[in-house]
Structure formats: structure tokens, C-alpha cells
Amino acid sequence: MPGQGGFPAPTEGLVLTHFLTVRDVAVSRDFYVNVLGGEVILEENPATVKVANSWIIMNPGGGPTPDKPDIVLTPPSPGDPVSTFLNVRVADINAFYAHATAQGVRFLTEPLDRKAEIRCYMRDPDGYLIEVGQATGLLQGIFADPPASG
């Protein structure tokens, strides 16, 4: 369904992409290529990387534009609350964890078994949170314990 050159431009229906406001396009682009195995579709303006069956689009931040008045795009700052994150599903979390760690990625924790899945979290160069998980018990109808109420 992508258009010419692999760019996410559907000829019918729609394609879902994820846009990230980044500080350094080249650094972020390399992260998504080297850690998640992405393929560069466009180097910049906007940088577009195809990752598995999805696309990540990256551009620097900026102020309002005519089509998004009153909106300022900026990457997250340390300590900012998280309201969205990328969720990556892998076939072998231990292999992914070893590969990403070898690429210099620092995870919040090692992969943890949560009954339904084994998962861990990392951050990209701009601080965006990325969950990496492998479905395990969920495939047999086993769910994780509910979160503690707070």
C-alpha cells in the first residue's frame, strides 16, 4: 500500500505513521535504523524510517503553522510526564535486548516476566519511551496482574 519509494503514501485507505519531534534528525534516524532494524526511506525533511510494518517520521520542533495554530512541537525534557509511547512487539526479547544493549541502549530494567508477557522499557535519543515486549502467557489466556491502585 505505500507509495513510490516506500514512502507511506497510500493509494487507497490509510496508513498509520508515528511522528516524533527530535533534537538531532541524524542521531534519531540512526537509532531507529540500528536498534530497531529500520530502513531509511527519506534522510530528512521529514526523515522517514520504515520499521517492520510501520513508519516513524522525524523532524525538528517548531512553532505554530497555518494548519496547526497555537501548537508548538518540542521533544520531551527529562522528568516530563509520559502520555504516549511506542510499543514494540518482538519474537525473542532476549535476543533483542542483547542486540540493543550492544548498540549502547540503556534500558530502565532488564526484561521482566509479567505473566502475560516479558517486557522492558528503553528511551530513544530524545527521551521518548519505548516498551519492548514478547507475548508469552497472553497467548494461552494468562493475563498480567492488575496495576496496584495509587
Image: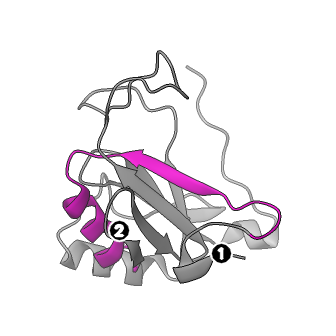
Q: Residue at x 66, y 52 (%)?
A: 144
Query: Relative to 99, does residue 58 appear above or below in the rendering?
Result: above
Coordinates of residue 85 in the picture (x, y in percent): 49, 46
Q: Residue at x 34, y 75 (%)?
A: 33
Residue that numbered label 1 is attached to: 2
22 to the left or right of 14: left
Direction top: furthest residue: 70
Label 1, secondary structure: give it. loop
Would residue 147 be seen by someone viewing this image from the given angle? yes
Q: Nearer the viewer, mark 2 or mark 1?
A: 1
For the residue pair 6 and 115, the one nearer the viewer reads as 6
In the image, which residues are magenta?
A: 11-37
Query: Relative to 67, does residue 41 appear above or below in the rendering?
Result: below
Mark 1: which amino acid? Answer: Pro
Q: Residue at x 23, y 65 (%)?
A: 105
Mark 2: which amino acid? Answer: Tyr
Label 2, secondary structure: give it. helix
Residue 35 part of the magenta-drawn span: yes
Locate the N terminus and report the quarter of the image it occupies.
Answer: bottom right
Coordinates of residue 10 in the picture (x, y in percent): 71, 67
Q: CA distance from mark 2 to mark 1?
A: 19 Å
Residue that numbered label 2 is attached to: 32
Locate the C terminus and report the quarter of the image it occupies.
Answer: top right
